[in-house]
Amino acid sequence: MTKDPIDKLLDDAQSGKSLFQNREVLHYSFIPNIILHREDEQKKVTQSLLPLLKKSRPSNLLVYGKPGVGKTLVVKKVLDKIQERVKDNSFPIHLLYANSKEETTLYGLLVKLGGQLGLKGKQLPSTGLSISEVFNRIIAKIEEDELNTVFVVDEIDFLAELISKSGKDILYSLTRANERLKKGTLTLIGISNDLTFKERLDPRVLSSMSEEEIVFTNYTVEQIKEILEERIKVAFIPNSVEAAALNLCSAMSGQEHGDARRAIDLLRVAGEMAEREQSDTVKEDHIRRASLKMEEDKETTALNSYPLHEKLLILAVMKAGGNTTGEIYQSYKNLCKITRQKELTQRRITQMLSEIEMTGLITGKIIHQGMHGRTKKFNLTLNADTVKKAFKEDLTLEDLV
Ligand SMILES: Nc1ncnc2c1ncn2[C@@H]1O[C@H](COP(=O)(O)OP(=O)(O)OP(=O)(O)O)[C@@H](O)[C@H]1O
Ligand SMILES: [Mg+2]
C-alpha cells in the first residue's frame, strides 16, 4: 500500500534531519554581529556623526553604492551604537530612520519621522495637512524641545519619485533645515543604491545634501565568500554546506553584482531545497537549481503583475511567435473572443507591444523585405512553460494555457 502523500511529507519533516540550526539569520532583516570588510565604511559613518557627542551638528551625509553592499547594515549599526551611548545623556539626541520604499507618499514618510519625535494624533494627523505644514510642525518640535536630530532616509531615490513639485522644495528645506532652526539641530543622512540619483537632483539640493559622501564599493568574490562563511556557521548545522557549493554561491553572486543580499538569498533557497530533498548537505547542484528557481520566480512575479490585456497580448506573442504586429493582433483578437473580452484597438496593442518590449519580456526584430519595406517581428524571450505556469493562476486565462 502506498503511503498517503500528506502523511509522507509530514513523516519526512518530523523524522528527517534539518540542515538548519537557525534559519532566521538568513532573513534579510537580520543584523549580524560581525560586519566583515566594511571597517573603513563603519569608521567613516561614525566619524561623520561624532560631532553629536560633542554637542554640535554633524554635516549632512550621502551614502551610496550598489544594492546589497552593506549600506543599511552599517548605518543602522552605527546609529544603534550611538543611541546606546547617549541613552542616559542629558543632551537629547534623536536618531530617526525611515525607508522611502516602504512609504507611498512623502507625507507618510514625514509623519513616520515626526512620530519618532513624539508627534502623535492631532499634533501630526496622518492626513489632511499640507506637506509644508507637516514639515513646519516637525521643525517647531525640534526647536521647542531643543532636540538634536538625525534623519536617516534610506533608499532616498524613491523619495525623489514620491515628490511632486512642492515636494522638491521640501527636500531642499530638509537639507537646509538647520539654517532655519534657532534651537536644536537636524542632520540628514540619505542612502541610495541608484548611482544616477545624484545626477537627477537639483544642484542646490545636491550640494547641501552631500556635505559629506561615503561610497560603498562592491564586494569581491572572496569577500562574499567570507561573509557567507560567517553566516553559515550560525545558520546551518556543522558541515552541511559543501565547499564546492559555497564557492559556486560566492562566484555567482560576487562576479556579477558583488551583492551580499543575493548571495545570502541564494544560499537560503538552496538550503531549503536540499532539506526538502532530505539531502545530507547543500551541494553545488542545489545552488545551481536555486539560482534558476529564483530567476524563474522573478519572471513569474513580473508576468503576474501585468493587467489582463497585457497578459492576453503576451499569450498572443507566444502563440503567434515570430510574427508581425498585424498577425499578433489577429491572434490577440482571437484570444479576446475565447475569453469574452472586449478587444482593444490595433493602435493601442502596437503601443503595448513596445511597452512590453522595453521590459525585455519580448524582443522585436526589424526584418527587411526588399521592395515591401520592413516589418517588425516579435518573439517571447521567456520559456513558454514559465508563461503558462504563471498565467494558470489567472482565472480568465486558466483555460487558454
Ligand atoms: N559585510 C557584511 N557582513 C555580513 N553581512 C552583510 C555584510 N554586508 C551585507 N550583509 C548582509 O547582506 C544583506 C544586504 O545588506 P544591506 O541591506 O546593508 O545592503 P544595502 O547596501 O543597504 O542594499 P540596498 O541598496 O539594496 O538597500 C543584509 O542581509 C546584510 O545583513
Ligand atoms: Mg539598504
Image (tube, rainbow, N blue to C red):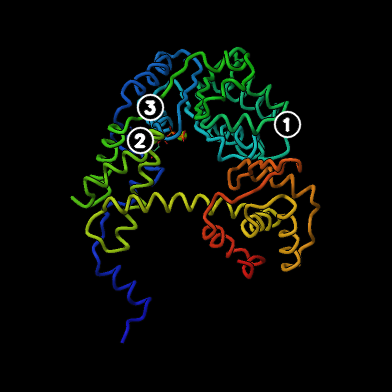
Q: Residue furthest bottom?
A: 1
Give the amino acid at mark 2: Gly
Pointer 2 or 1: first along the chain = 1
Pointer 3 or 2: first along the chain = 3
Instruction: Give percent across and percent down for residue 253.
Output: 37, 39
Q: Is residue 131 above or below residue 8?
A: above
Element class at badge 3: helix
Q: Which residue lies under the disc numbered 3?
A: 78
* Pick the front one: 379 or 241: 379
* Pick the front one: 328 or 53: 328
Separation of marks 2 and 1 at Cα, in angstroms: 45 Å
Q: Quadrant of ligand 1?
A: top left
Element class at badge 2: helix
- Is residue 76 toward the left or the right of residue 390 in the image? left
Q: Are marks 2 and 1 in contact (CB under 8 Å)?
A: no
Element class at badge 1: loop
Give the amino acid at mark 3: Val
- Is residue 276 toward the left or the right of residue 168 in the image? left
Q: Nearer the viewer, mark 3 or mark 1?
A: 3
* Mark carried by residue 15: none
Give the amino acid at mark 1: Ser
* Mark carried by residue 130: 1
Res 134 quadrant in image: top right
Instruction: Give percent across and percent down for residue 61.
Output: 49, 19
Res 159 quadrant in image: top right
